[in-house]
Image (cartoon, rainbow, N blue to C red):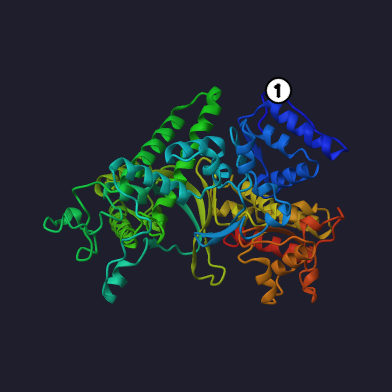
Amino acid sequence: MEKKEGEEFLISKDCELETILELAHEIKKIDPDIILTKGGDQFLFPQLLYRAKINKINFQLITNLNREPSQEFLQEKFKYFLKDNLLSANTSSSSSSSFTSYGQIHFRSNPFYLYGRIHIDIETSFIYKEARLEGLSEISRICRIPMQIASRATIGRCLSSLYFYNAGKKGILVPWKPTTSEIFKRFTDLLNADKGGFIFESKPGAYEKVAEFDFVSLYPNIMLKKNISSETINCNCCLLHLDLDNRVPGLEHIYHICKRRAGIVPSSLSIVLERRSEYKKRKNNIGCQKNTKLKERYDKRQAALKWILVTSFGYLGFNNSKFGRIDARIAVCAFARDIMLKISKIVKSHGFEIIHGIVDSIWIKRNSVKSVNGFDNYKSYENLKKDIEDKTGFSISFEGTYKWIVFDSSKENSDLPALNRYFGIFQDGTIKTRGIEARRHDIPSLFAKFQGELLQSISTKNNIKDIIKIIPDLEGIYKRYRDLIYYKKVHFSELVFTKRISKDSDEYFNKGRKTIESCVIQLLSNNGKSLFAGQEIKFIITDFYNKNYMKRAIPIELIQDLNLNYDSTKYCKLLNDCYNSIIKYFK
């Protein structure tokens, strides 16, 4: 709960009635505009209100939680939470839902809205986790959604609201269901059209003196500059006025784009792109340390807008999007592939080769040995950047040069590259990682800490030879962590795995699976906690190789012994895997 500056309070009463009354009194006294909770939707507020009803003070609590004087209004709005069977109702399918987003299943509990105040459950708010209140307020403002609703909404829902707003401004009716279907294509045309983004596959290994370039919001800018939207693809008004300017590259005989009217999607994205660009400009222009807070505000706002732009491309091909259409998505990919092919020629003409490239980013290395102090002249990169922008019409940023960078291989086949798993050190010492264990949220914090220490140790080395020289030191770090695990000197809180389940609890039981996840879900169910698809489980591995799968792990909710006997053998094996993923290309 947000408190006024300098004001603190602690509620500690043995009597439940007095505790709830004091909490209600403190809320009324502090009178916050925003209340932040952890699990406020799913458990905290429903349980608090349930216990208040048992103690016959529920309306006093509701009145103090809200700034609404009408008891009739509040009684109507909170009637669901005042049910006699509240605890069972709050875990029923009618009050919660599971949904799929970008291949992952998420769980959404029944929202506990306040009136006159704003309640944000930080455990369920994706936008708050990514960009805090600054980013949430920016999304709420630009997408025209109340902050309480925006905090619980998906980025796709926020984006849809922005589309609806712009459609309303243009006087366009929003269809109840998407009405535009994919155009018919011959089999050969489908093969040529449905290719996705362009990828330059890297050869797994370690590289020195590599530069990175990233396009600035490439796909949203393609939608904006090329006027790509569901209603602008193959419009009827331009059939008699077709030329190269409104044809889709590589698919000229299939698609054309309207030149007479701006689409809803590009019209909506223009304001997002402009505002993000302005926030980034203001952030970079702040050099004084006294303005650190202001710099952070700009950064949070632009980060929130970035998620809108990232989502816009995926939503363009979403079958339930009112202004989405798979043909529009195919057109964006076609323009992006054309741009990447142009880049490959430009890079080669400047004496570089592409080491790796994925969708809108490229990593390049000089063909011949022409460098200054071990690195190519900064001016050569600036010339390349300008040439790319002039010939493609899209802005690209020079991210910097790496002392060294490692592109990892697939875990299934060491000869194949992992497209988005790499780590490296920029010339200024900045560490950049993608896809490795230290970046993942599902592995224990100890492993992330371990890899972070390894990366810090090798970040000071300017080349691969220098790293090879300190392999014994890295081995020492590994042995130290291994001994901590083996001799049970690590607290179990650093060994917690987090997994998002893909099915409801009963579906795991019906299929008779004997996995770690099944063990944890069964133990929770035996203790009265049922889970829905999309919810997370947190657990410790206790005996991974036990034939009785019910003894392989324990959920953190059931841990009673602070000296928990975890499976040191399994954890040491996982630690070794984390170690090898960092040093295998330096051996």
Q: Depth check: give the residue in front, 470 or 62.
A: 62
Q: Depth check: give the residue in front, 516 or 40.
A: 40
Q: Residue furthest front?
A: 72
User: Could you tell me residue 111's position as x and y percent?
Assistant: 60, 47
**Taking the image as drawn, is residue 374 in sight?**
no
Which residue is at 31% across, 72% downward? 191
Number of numbered markers: 1
Say left or right for 521 vs 271: right
The relative height of residue 483 versus residue 171 in the rendered view (above or below) is below
The relative height of residue 472 versus residue 504 in the rendered view (above or below) is above
Query: Which quadrant would the C terminus be assigned to in this image?
Result: bottom right
Q: Which residue is mark 1?
A: 6
User: Could you tell me residue 266's position as x and y percent?
Assistant: 31, 47
Query: Which quadrant would the N terminus be assigned to in this image?
Result: top right
Q: Depth check: give the residue in front, 291 or 73.
A: 73
Q: Depth check: give the residue in front, 52 or 253.
A: 52
User: Could you tell me residue 107's position as x and y percent?
Assistant: 60, 56
Judged from the image, the secondary structure of the residue bearing numbered disc 1 is loop
Say left or right for 371 vs 427: left
Which residue is at 86% across, 53% downward? 562
Say left or right for 336 vs 25: left
User: Could you tell me residue 425's position as x and y percent?
Assistant: 53, 47
The answer to which image quadrant residue 314 occupies is bottom left
